[in-house]
Image (cartoon, grey):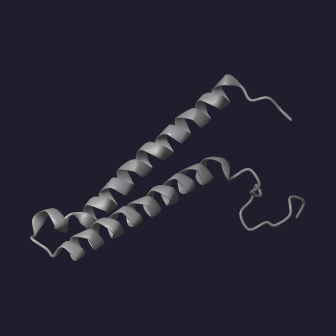
Amino acid sequence: MERRTQADRDAVTIEIGYALLSAAVAGALVFGAVAGPKLMFALPYAFERGLLVAGASAGAVVFVLRVVAVLWRFGGGADQPSQPGRTRPDS
């Protein structure tokens, strides 16, 4: 097991911070887009409640997907072959 340098640890910290911040912004935008009509229009209580639940659910899903996508892109490329289309390193 190799030790990580300070630069590697800093890069991971920055990437995690970016993933969380961008996911929070994306989740908030989705929540606002779904639940926003509640603020604009006089709607029945059940419909307003449904919009809030749907907005919160969609925002949470977008948050998780964004975090996973950013972190996957950051650390997921190590096992890729060096040349696209090649399945074995010695082919």
| In this rendering, position of residue 8 left or right of residue 16 | right
Residue 50 vs residue 58, the one in the foreground: 50
Which corner quadrant of the image does residue 90 belong to? bottom right
Residue occupying the point 47% across, 45% down: 20
Tell which residue pokes out farthest to the right in this image.
90
Q: Is residue 2 above or below residue 69?
A: above
Residue occupying the point 37% across, 55% down: 26
| In this rendering, position of residue 25 left or right of residue 10 | left
Image quarter of the N terminus: top right
Which corner quadrant of the image does residue 91 belong to? bottom right
Q: Is residue 13 above or below residue 90?
A: above
x, y percent for residue 46 = 23, 75
x, y percent for residue 14 = 53, 34
Residue occupying the point 61% across, 47% down: 74
x, y percent for residue 37 = 18, 68
Residue 35 vs residue 76, the one in the foreground: 35
Question: What number of labels is visible?
Answer: 0
Q: Is residue 23 above or below residue 16?
A: below
Residue 90 vs residue 33, the one in the foreground: 33
